[in-house]
Image (cartoon, rainbow, N blue to C red):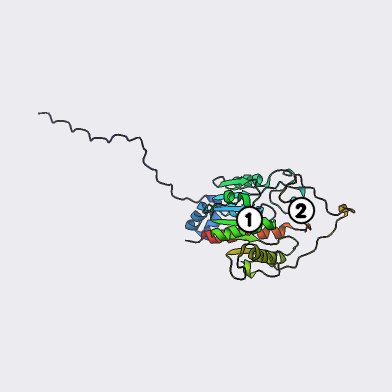
Amino acid sequence: MNPQPTPPEAVPAATGTPAPSEPKPFKLHRRFDRTGRLLGDPAMERLAKARVIVFGLGGVGSYAAEGLVRSGIGQLTLVDFDTVCVTNGNRQLHATAKTVGKPKAELMAQRCKEINPDAQVQGLREFYRDELADQLLAPGSYDYVVDAIDNVKAKLHLLHRCVSLGIPVVSSMGAAARLDPTAIRVEDLCETHMDPFAKDIRKLLKRKYGVPTERPTGITAVYSIEQRRQPLSLRYDADDGFSCVCPNDNDFHSCEHRNQIDGSVAFVTSVFGMNAAGVVVRRLSQSR
């Protein structure tokens, strides 16, 4: 007798719904090798998954964004309404002779993507204000906020919103009118001293929003203990004093809206920004 062939096993009918694919295990890219050797793979994976938003991309914020993307932050949103002015060239990372008149947010987003093509980077040409707060900073949307805004009204609203929503925030105080990068300090806002701008922020946050700034606020402040230097007149000011040469004026914030135009230098503003980035990276890289 010939043996009967064994019938094939029944194959389940396809349901049309593919099985969920397993997420790929994290693998550190070689571009972050040196950071990884300081922090380790688990910390680098946390940074790659972190969501950070930077408000203000000037002399402080542009360097903060640079420090964040070069440290492996995987999701960055960069917010600034302004365009590059020729006077930005001495201290702002995106400012060159070729970029005058171009939007800062777009320039920095492009730069960050060139540094880390795997990062999710969004540049938003917006000015933070009350009307856009829900859109720009929704509850639970970010793991950390970098405040590099120099408009007092906007800064106060942003800091109060971060405190109210429990979003960690690092805030730049007065970086202009200083020449000594070794005088920069990082402390809770309530501990700041010898910085008139930080003093005003403490006072106004308490008066306008009821934030008790006499005790720890949860707002990490980057500030300087160096005494402010008064701006000097220049020959091309002639008899008219300072004249704004920004390519695009706006209704929110411009040179013409300021009482005084202070001097500033890259080797101070950049250190403010890198200190802010350092605060974020150290905090987010820690195990939770």
Q: Is residue 262 left or right of residue 47?
A: right
- Report which quarter residue 17 is drawn in: top left
Type of amino acid at the residue the image marks with label 2 = His
Q: Is residue 238 left or right of residue 226?
A: right
Observer able to see residue 168: no
Depth check, front residue: 139 or 87: 139
Locate residue 145, reporting x and y percent: 58, 56
Q: Which mark is residue 275?
A: none
- Report which quarter residue 63 is drawn in: bottom right
Say which quadrant the N terminus sits in. top left
Q: Is residue 27 left or right of residue 84?
A: left
Q: Which residue does the numbered mark 1 point to in the structure image?
A: 64
Marks 1 and 2 sit apart, C-alpha to C-alpha, by: 25 Å
Task: State the residue at coordinates (65%, 44%).
Answer: 106
- SS at mark 1? helix
Type of amino acid at the residue the image marks with label 1 = Ala
Characterize the local packing of mark 2: few (<14), some (14-19) or many (20 or more) Cα atoms within 10 angstroms.
few
Depth check, front residue: 68 or 216: 216
Locate residue 284, reporting x and y percent: 53, 59
- SS at mark 2? helix
Q: Which residue does the numbered mark 2 point to in the structure image?
A: 257
Q: In the rendered structure, which disc, 1 or 2, sits on the residue that comes first in sequence? A: 1
